[in-house]
Image (cartoon, coloured by chain):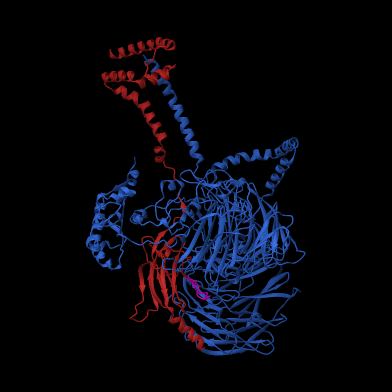
Amino acid sequence: MSLEANSEAKRFYSTSSPWEARIGYYRAVRRGQHIFVSGSTAADPDSPPEAPRVRYPGDARQQARVTLEEIIQAIQAVGGKGAESVVRCRMFVSRKEDCGVVGEAFREILGKQNGGQLRRVRGRLVAISISAQSCRQHHPLLPPLLPPACRSSTNMRLQAALLAAACISPAVAIFSDEVNHIDFHHALLGAPSSDSTFFLKPSSASNASLLYTLSDKLILGAVNPRDGALVWRHNISRSDSPAGGAGLLRGLDGNNAVVGAAGDYISSWSAQDGKLIWDQQFDGNNVADIELLELEDVTATSDTRDTLALISGKSFGSVRRFDGDSGAVKWEYIDESGDIPFQVSSSPTEVFYISLQSGLLKSSKIKVTALDPITGRQTSQQVLNTEGDITGPESVLFAGANTASPLIVWTDKAHKSLKINVIGSKQISSLAIDNTSGEEIRQITVHAPHKLNSLPHFLVHYKTGSGAWAEVYHVDLKSAAVTKAYQLPYLQGQSVIATSSIDANVYFTRVTDSEVVVVSSASHGIIGRWNVDASSADYAQAAVAEVVAKGKSVAVRAVVLRDSGDWQLIRNGQIEWTRPEALIDAVAATWVEAEEKEDLAHELEVEGHDSIHGAYIHRVKRHVRDLQHLPDWLKALPQRIVSSVLSDEVTNLDSFGVAKPVIVATRSGRVYALDTGRQGAVIWSVQASEQAWDVKDITARPGQVIIDLSDGSYVSVNASTGKTSTHTALEGTKVQSIANFVVSDGSSLVRLGGVGIREDGSPVTPFNDITGFLVTTSVNGRVLGWIESDNKTPVWEFVPPSGQKAVKATARPAHDPVASIGKVLGNRSVLYKYLSPNLVLVTAVNEKDHVAGLYLLDGVSGRVLHSATQAGVDPTQPISSVMSENWFAYSFFGDAIGESSAKGYQLVISELYESSIANDRGPLDAAGNYTSLHSSGAESLPLPHVVSQSFMITEPISHMTVTQTRQGITTRQLLCTLPSSNSIVGIPRPVLDPRRPVDRDPTSAEAEEGLFRYAPFLDFDGKWYLTHTRDVAGIKDVLSRPTLLESTSLVLAYGGDIFGTRATPSQAFDVLGKSFSKLQLVLTVVALTGGVIFLAPVARKKQVNLLWKAT
Amino acid sequence: MLVLIFALLFQLAAASLTINIPPSTNLPNPHVLPATTHATLTTLPQHGRQDHILTTSLTRSSTLVFRNIPSGEPESYLLDIRSSEFVFAPFRVDVAADGSILGIWETFRGNPWDNRGAEKYVVDVANKKTTNVVVEAKVLGRKGFYEERAKFSPLSLVKNPMILLAIVALVFTLGMPKLMENMDPEMRAEFEEQQRSSPISGASSAMAGGGFDLAGWMAGATPKPSPAANAEGTGSGAGATGRDSGSARRRA
């Protein structure tokens, strides 16, 4: 009909070969601009298919020639040009020795210009495959459970033709206009450390600056100050580096690099796009300090500045100068005097190495060694007499500043006087601290500019318990004398200072409870003041600011780092954005029911239990009560109609439970409520615990959330206000985990109770009031089964064989509805699913032998129903597993252990059926009941028939879960967390069907069932990625929850970032999507009405005419 | 001091592997790769060693550099390059006991580890060992993450068979009388005659008249003059005269 349809039509070419008709394939197929030639060989077309003969037996060259000629003939027959059209060629040779002569034949016929490379010739692509008489084909992952008969050699020749068969997988991807509508993402860095956070212009050419920070989680990142969006980030903590406290981050304006250090790892990153410039690791020797060398020496050629690093070893300190571009060491100064390496600093002419020389009685002296910046040789050395004041690195308030006059600042122990030394001189200035507040000074911080050309001014900020003041000092460059210039007054409440500089001028920005004030370092006049309500129970810890001078006035953007770790940008007194950085490291999360819903549910329950009359009256009353909402509803009606036409979504789905709030508990003791309906905005946040806590479980109750801790105590949090109350346990038993007894009641879950589990796997208390059983794992790698009344001795114990230790046990999710008890095959027969609610999947590993065992147990009796062993498994890499319905899946890294095995990450899927035969329900066919407790007899639990297939995947899977929907009718998706690409992929279950035919095409019955040919490599389709282009890092756990819409499952990922989305594994079949245009519908109706109005008289006239005409 | 110098020397001596990402049809500008792009060397841990997974980040010159490949035992690493959007071919990297690279080949997932693809590098035993090996990465493709939303186009509306039927019907209703008008009078008469005798027109005219015997028509019976049809017949007769006189007028 159209051109498109024509170009998509297939054209075929077949030869006289009897096999083509017999097996059912064509020699060549052309579709559009592509021609596919099936695998060809020098078969004799005259030979019978029962006893195929080969032409020119024994002569590989002739065979290859004949084959290639036949292929070229086939190409020309479907409209190709011939040899020059060939772009790809695969040859299989059965004997190695034949490679040479076959190659010659190839060159003769196809010529060098075509040589096996992908090429585009005048827009026509041809794919060719050639196969010789016999070739090996490997399926290293062929699962052991498949009958070996599947490997037939007759299909070899078809292989090539089948390469063209596209993967027919159902892909349900997100629409690009739904991004940020159905999903949200908090890309987090962690609480920024105050001395490693700064504004920086990433390149000398750019005018806009970015905000750089290194967080307490050692994540280095750049944030756009305009909207608070993350530009790039890197985790610079190395797992094998010792926990070396806070990291360091340095940057210089106009220098296209930021240098970060954490532990023994130092790395330089391109400031603009976050790409690596160089990195170094110093096996176990920590980086104590880094500094960028601002001075330009003659040798400097590029705009990237060199880095000075102080490396602190066990018995030495070493200062190294690294080349800014390559990271090569230009020079090294080694100090083996046994001093504690403290800091490096630089002035325009010298590099200073500051170390602490231990003196008498735990006190130390500061030693300053001046080095030549070009050669690294020592030029002078001074020891400052600081004994009595300095006890360790923590008592030095400030050192460095990279300015024209770098400083060392400390105080005496009583905080009575401030001692200042201009580095390089021996002189120590002592200034009395004028404390008029009448309170003890809690904290002293020194703020100085970090630029060489800045004025040598600095500010000292004194903080008491309830307020703060600051003093500004000037340094005389010639005499190195320090004088006090002016004072910023004492103010109650919070106060933080930030330093910024424009050219030589230095500005101090002070953020207090009620205002933001900018002063110049030269004089005390306030040059900018904005009223801002920045008061918060969450105290400001530090601030960084960027001041822009506009004529006489200034503009300022200040980023305030709060105690909780939250970031807030205040631009000229306006709060522009807040980044909830404390959300990082979430340990538990749950959805909460909105309270009004709970009310309705409660009332319906009352009605359900009442007598018919009572229920009727109750219901009438309820509806009468509801009438009070009628005026509001009527008032809102016009707006609703308008918004429903204009809004993104055709229907507002909030009432279907897709926009439930989420409660998230973080490791640091904070609890957050996030509104998933509004891009995960923070509704409230509270510090529920002063210290970091060990959360074991989180459960949602009507209107509140219970957080269970490892010491047996629990915290209840009001879901709507965030009010917390802590309940300490009577007996402080350390629990390893909490087991929840949950029964599925329709589509909702009813929690019966919970019990704490000790480290050895035993329940803390007997769970008498609950009918059920419990399966636990113990720290020594065993699996134990318990029944209600006994918490001392387990009913059964499973010890994995051959030195394996159980590392994980998984069960089916509490809400796991099964829509169909069987699987209908293409021929309308049924394979019955093996559905037992008591299944436990145990993962056990032997770390020495690299063996992993998967054991499917019956949870009641502990009987092993199925087991699988995988060799060559890396136990240090994640082995994730999941179970649902009648199937389970697991993933691991497998090494090549044998001749034909593969190396890489594998994903294994196993399905359980009652019998291998269709329409057969196994031994339990007619039985109404069965028991797990008798191992023999008519009512005993039969073993499942297990079908498995394994796939090679490209990357590790650290966590697996399954999408949950209300009825389980929707196809399930296997949600896999991919830590190496920071994404979450939802693999559709039909792709992971272990009954996919191996080494052959599906029969028509199988194709009808949706099965397609097995391929050992499973490539994750981009459309499967729930996270699409987002970089969702550090995910530890993914939750899924059904909504009132059968098509939709809520997904929440947490652990590092927080990511939430709606998964629709079978597409949103019960929702009118965005593509449904109401406007189009209205226009169509209008057009049709118009058409009817126009045509009606015409038709009437015609009818009348017809009547007149008749007879 | 000595330890340190030794460590420095060791760092210089250890082999390094540089992977270049050249521009290709799939990736014309390698500089667009995000900063999260990284390469990983993976193998099974030997005797509890921790450094069996090596990772390196993309540099600003679009290369991936592994420094200090650990020595100890000969290893065969799987080299993966991962980027959020682009798919790279995996490589097999064989490393000798001293940490120098023996060879790099392309490898195919889901195939035996021994099944090596195109050779990227092989150590030249005769010559000195090169400490820095440079290979080129191969971009296999690009992932598409988003579903395309069907755009509204008038053409797709026209392609709808219902709309097509409606349009054809419209053309007939409006165009037929015009066509008849322009026809040669004799031909028109002939055509009308033909139409009258054709069963379809008979059906439609009968339908227009009401009281249509569908079953009879389907059975191929000629419409019998029923009482209702008789009553109509007088009316239509009058109409016919009217029309005849009209046409006579025109003819005259």
Q: Residue A264 location in percent, x, y?
A: 54, 77
In the image, residue A648 sits, relative to residue A509, either above or below, namely above
User: Is the stretch drawn in magenta largely helix, strand or loop?
Assistant: loop
> Is residue A538 visible to us here?
yes
Rendered hue of chain A is blue
Q: Residue furthest right?
A: A730
B45 drawn magenta = yes
* Quarter of the figure that contains the N terminus of chain A: top left
In the image, residue A879 sits, relative to residue A523, either above or below, namely above
- Of residues A591 and A332, the one nearer the viewer is A591
Q: Residue A155 location in percent, x, y?
A: 36, 55
Q: Which chain is red?
A: B
Q: Could you tell whether A499 is left or right of B199 in the image? A: right
A434 drawn magenta = no
Q: Could you tell whether A752 is left or right of A506 in the image? A: right
Q: Could you tell whether B104 is left or right of A37 in the image? A: right
Q: Residue A609 location in percent, x, y?
A: 73, 41
- Of residues A178 and A980, the one nearer the viewer is A980
> Residue A888 lies in what quarter of the image?
bottom right
Number of numbered discs present? 0
Q: Residue A623 location in percent, x, y?
A: 71, 37
- Of residues A210 and A1066, the one nearer the viewer is A1066
Per the rendered image, the range of residues in magenta is B43-54
* Quarter of the figure that contains the C terminus of chain A: top left
